[in-house]
Image (tube, coloured by chain):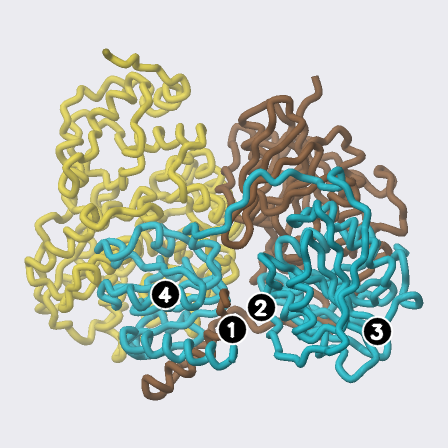
Chain colours: A brown, B yellow, C cyan
Amino acid sequence: MHEFHIVVCMKVVPKAEEIRVDPESLLLDRENARSEINPPDMNAIEHALRIKDQCRARVSILSMGPPLFESILRVGLAMGADDFYLLSDRAFAGADTLATTYTLARGIDKIGDVDLVICGEESADGATGQVPAGIAEWLGWPQVTLATEFQLSDDYTVCTARREIPGGYEVHRVKLPAVFSVKTASNEPRFMDFDRKPWAMEEAGVIVWSRSDIEVEDDLIGLKGSPTIVSGLEQAETRARQQHMLEGDPESIAAQLAEILAPFHTRN
Amino acid sequence: MIDALLIDDGLQDEMMGVFGQAAWACFQCGACTATCPWGIVSERSLSIREMMRRAQLSVGGAGGDVWLCTDCGQCLQSCPRGVPVSRVFQAWRGQLWKKRTVESGLTPVLWSVYWNGNPLSQPPSERMNWADGLDVPLFDAKEHEYLLFVGCTASYDPRAQKAARALVRILNTSGSDYGVLGEQERCCGECVLRMGHRPYFEDIARANLEQFRKAGVRRVVTISPHCYDAFNNHYPDRKEFVSIHYSQLLLDLLASGKIDLESTPSSRLSFHDPCLLSRANPEYETPREILAHFDGIEFEELDRSRAETLCCGGGGGRIFLETLPDERFSNLRIQEAQQHAIQTLLTTCPLCISCLEDSRSAIQVENLKVLDLAEFIVSAIVPDGRE
Amino acid sequence: MAVSLYGPEDARQTVCVYLEHNAGRLEDVSLGLISKALELTSGSDWRVCGLILGDDTRKPAQEALARGLGEVISIQHEIMTRFDVSAFTRACFEVILQEKPAVFILGATPDGRDLAGRLAVRLRTGLNADCTDLRLNLETGQLISEVSGFGGGVIALLESPAHRPQMSTVRPGVFEQQFVRPVKSGVIRQIDVSLSRSDLQSELLERSVGERLDLSKSQVLICGGRGMHGEFVQLNALAEQLGGEVGATRPPVDEGYIERERQIGQTGVVCRPKLAVTCGISGAFHFVVGIQEADTVVAINIDPQAEIFNYCDYGVVADAHQVIPALIEALARESHSSHA
């Protein structure tokens, strides 16, 4: 029988507070930043592993990035994933959403017989949230974004997913294979299983595919395959709080506060 | 009808690892349950005796009670057979980690230790922010006699930061040769151990030992009794370095005349003994000897002191779990201080300070201050002691 | 080089705005986009058109004209009773290829993101997501999108020089709705797209939009502490007014003034709202960790020494009991005048 196969797309991001823009080159200085697994992707793998807890399923990690991703994403193997595919090639570098989703989709094709692709809601660095839809489009599969719960049909061909929308929820039923993104913080990612950890960190073989291993058109990958360019980059004001003290009589303070709060109205 | 009791194989293995031949030492006298501070705050109390029996028989079902233990060590103190009760609790918890049925909120603590090097979800790059404006050198084995291990709470919690700042001001005035690891300092792992994840604790211990070894650390001074206890009693194969608590260092400095006490505070004092400096490590004379260096202070012991101290409630990972208001040990402690008309309650542990400060403001006690011993001393040696 | 289905040379000087609607009304984010598109193109030959899809688009399409659009392209089809990413992508794709706009902008809502992500791939074009500002060079037709990354730590300007349409989704709430005189000659153009049930990708089994308490997702959080002395009525009113939720520190929860689900901090809920207003809160660390990811923090406390003032963007040394009612009134006045 076909083994139910879930691919979780994951990436590594530098810790946000350590990112600096080099004032001269206007490039991001990621070199000196500590890295971690993109936090929303931790929710994605937890959802995949919960499905695996309930039925016989294989969970594979798929990532695109430099070799340094390897040691960090092995954490996913220690959490319970079975395989780890890393798409790594200098030619993949500089990819925007279009090239990234193309490359990941070709990786999923190459893995083959995938039933479910689960992604995090968005990446902490780019925060585009467009990757799940892009992958789904390249693959021609249905998509459900912002999912919080999954329920598979008895024959594993249909998935019912609850998704979160502003102010409420929806329940969708889609035929598999399909692509899902999961709502950030929709679960509490399990810690590493220390019985698996030695295997995961040392022994497990990571399947590294370069450009020639997956069937890609050179025009569609990396910088060449990316329509968007960065024409300017600046360091936003740091998270340090402004600590601006408002002065005046109660009336005037209320008026100042009203002005500050007005943009935050979330309802009409 | 009687429910069948199911033997839990995983628990049995875990418990065998803890007890070994001592498995049957517990003869169910119940002294542990009788002396457990949970009995003071809650009618249902924590039946350690029952849990010991379940542990012996490897029968699960201890439920949420496993997470009540603050690892205060009072039961160990009362046990006539020397049963390692807290190890048993950790083993219970270890089993729940394996089954992934731990209380919600605890897994993120472990992940934070993993990604941030602290259990408080704070950025590692901000670990030295506590020392802003102070001269705190990075450790260099060639220059420094010892490593000051700041610990996570003192690094990030603004209340505890004040204690750390007070301490380094004392060290700087007394010409001490110390350095810190700065952003490279990582959690000692004590909270992980108490929360029952022994394998991860062992990983952390190995990594920290390796870091100390590389840096050439021979002597460690900790701010938190929790780091101190972890280094001294739980780190494996620790031969290269000795670890002391900062109160011991301050006593040395006072005894050797390197600290001049210029003034004597006039308030009525008492001392809250942290569990880990009274029961697990019998260091309770140290703060009292320090206070003896002050002339004419007004000091009164609390009812429960030294080895009979009352836990603040923040140990054993409890600081990461919610405790209902009428079940907070620290409330009792504040009330006790109030009954003795204490004006300044001293202690030497960042978690104790955090819990006691919380209870002090909850009970709305106006004329009681909670101070770290270092804060108290700095106010006696520096003209403008309070920052 | 990846090539889009049409390039700058074939693109028309058109900004196409995707219009989201619900219950016969345009969504706020779409109204903001209309205003921005009109502003970007004002005084030029550029054309701005709306694109609206649904089983009945008449009312919201009219509303778009009333908001100053000269043209709305409407696709009505009986299967489009609700958003379905597959059917909507297909319909939009056809219209875009017919109209060849140089710019296509959408709201970065769940539906907008779903649609934009698929459409950009199908059109082989660039997509900038969750933008916080847009600029348009009317000469070159180049759209410049401002986005923030790394939790807002970095701001980047992005362009798609060789690909059309230039697609961007815009973060809801960043563009204000301007009042614009309706265009008298405004037209609604119906375009037929052949669709069938098989174009729907998913079955919607259930949909519920209502009140559910989840503080971690609240965009606006009004927090009360010990200093409120159990008075949460005003805070509830302020939260209601701003469309937010009320949270609390441990003491009011302990004292039973408010449910424990609303406790914020290390042992409660950790939130990342756009705005947190703390009232009568001193700022203990275990509380502060619950709001430290907030975009903006306003603190009101009577004690000028309170620790919370080290964690706020705006601080008010005053009794919250006095400030909040005045604030509620001031906000009411302001929203009244802006809607008039």
Mark 1 to mark 2 CA distance (whole Å): 8 Å
- Residue named by callout 2: C173
* Element at label 1: helix
Write the residue at 20% across / 26% down. Answer: B49
Residue C327, numbered circle: none
- Residue named by callout 3: C141
Q: Amino acid at mark 1?
A: Pro
Write the residue at 32% across / 87% down. Answer: A249
Mark 4 to mark 2 CA distance (whole Å): 56 Å
* Disc number lying in front (4 or 3): 3
Mark 1 to mark 3 CA distance (whole Å): 30 Å
- Residue named by callout 1: A263
Residues at marks 4 and 3 on the same chain = no
Other-residue count near label 3 (Cα within 10 Å), few / some / many at <14 / 14–19 / ≥20:
some
Q: Amino acid at mark 2?
A: Gly
Picture coordinates of residue C282, whole percent (x, y): 30, 68
* Element at label 4: loop
Is residue C195 placed above or below B126 in the rendered structure?
A: above
Q: Amino acid at mark 3?
A: Gly
Is residue A193 placed above or below C91 in the rendered structure?
A: above
Q: Is residue C9 visible?
A: yes
Residue contact between numbered discs 1 and 2, judged by CB atoms under 8 Å: yes
* The quadrant where residue B51 appears: top left
Other-residue count near label 1 (Cα within 10 Å), few / some / many at <14 / 14–19 / ≥20:
few
Picture coordinates of residue A53, whole percent (x, y): 54, 27
